[in-house]
Image: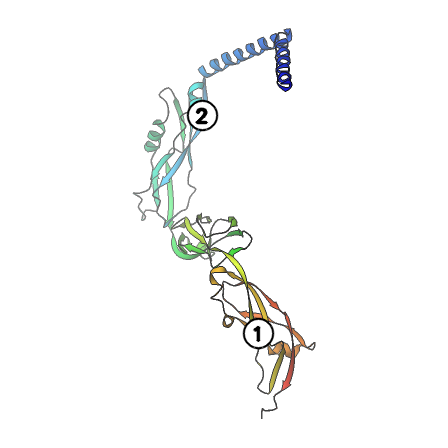
Amino acid sequence: MSWFKNIVRTCHTVLTDIKAFLHRQRWKEALIFFCFVLLSFGFWLLQSLQQEYETDMSIPIRYTNVPDDIIFTNKIPQAINIRIKDKGSALLNYTIGQKFRSITIDMTGLSKESGKFTVDKRYIEAEVQKQVLATTTLYSIEPQAITLRFGMRKSKEFPIVFQGNIQTEKGFLVSSDIQISPSRVTVYASDSILDTIQEIKTVYTEIKNGKKNITRVVALEPIEGTNFETNNVSVTIPIEEYTEKMLSIPVTVTGVPVNYKIRTFPQAVEVACNIPISRFKELTEDMFTVEVPYAQLEENVSGSIDVQVTKKPDWVRYCHLSPAKIEFLLEQNTSFK
């Protein structure tokens, strides 16, 4: 029980030290000073909040039901700037309490023939007045009215391309093409902008530690001066566990003149490749071609040449040839007349 007595003794010593500190004169003076400072600040704050001030504030604008096939030709206001006067408590409420809501501008009634859409002064003033307190004096509103000028956009369909980096866990690989739905998107823009676009990319997306199929909703990367028919697509990344398979593939020399024949040593090479486990039995030798062009043999004086896989299934990855070089012998075909 000696350890328990030591703990009790230590706690008693600490409490004694704390009591001694609190009874010191300096501590009492510091505490009294701090209380006076706190009270002074409280009185100052209350007095300040009762005084009136002028300040500038901004109310955001939200545009709704904007047709996809129009393009604005002037700068679109994103906020209504107001100058108001009120007590500090009311202004503080606008800042951290009842914040301004967005003013909605609905473009449902837009006339495409007119080339402009006008929001009059009365509407803006009424929307602002709805949000200010009765005690608040409203000095100015800017802009007082909004005129949106626009022209008609053209449209064109473009393919969507996934943009990102995919990292799989060890032993796993992307087993086939990435699927994007929809695979194409209609883009609305002026002719000059549409002529510069070849494809629409997704925003850069990073996948880490993938070990199974992944489906995500990914946003399209915006292009200034354009509208997309849809701003998000579904991206499916097929990820599967891989294994290695060995195949013996004969070497073929292409383009050999009829009066020559070629002997290669060896006549076949071993191809080691990574494939999805689900397709292990499906993979056969006839799915591969290992070739050497005759023209390269003519230029070669060393008697050995590199071979390469010229045909394989798309889902086969990382083919390794053994040997990577073969020897060859060029002979004249004596049977040719």
Residue beneath disc 1 = 291
Distance between the Cα atoms at labels 1 and 2?
74 Å
Residue 106 figure quarter: top left
Measuring 35% from the left and 38% from the top, which residue is drawn there?
105
Q: From what the image shows, is residue 9 above or below residue 220?
A: above
Give the camera-side residue of 117 and 314.
314
Relative placement, left or right, of 21 versus 163 is: right
Measuring 61% from the left and 15% from the top, which residue is drawn there?
8
Residue type, mark 2 in image: Ile
Q: Position of residue 37 (x, y in %)?
A: 56, 12
Q: Position of residue 312 (x, y in %)?
A: 52, 68
Give the camera-side residue of 115 and 163.
163
| Residue 96 tag number | 2
Q: Residues within 10 Å of mark 1 (few under 14, many from 20)?
A: some
Quadrant showing the N terminus: top right
State the scheme by which the image is colored.
rainbow
| Residue 124 tag number | none
Relative placement, left or right, of 163 versus 59 is: right
Residue type, mark 1 in image: Glu
> Of helix, strand and loop, which one carries label 1?
strand
Observer able to see residue 87: no
**Mark positioned earlier in the residue sequence (1 or 2):** 2
Q: Residues within 10 Å of mark 2 (few under 14, many from 20)?
A: few
Give the camera-side residue of 155 and 99.
99
Q: Position of residue 21 (x, y in %)?
A: 63, 10
Asked whether disc 1 touches disc 2, contact meaning CB atoms under 8 Å apart, the reply is no
Give the camera-side residue of 71 and 197.
197
> Of helix, strand and loop, which one carries label 2?
helix
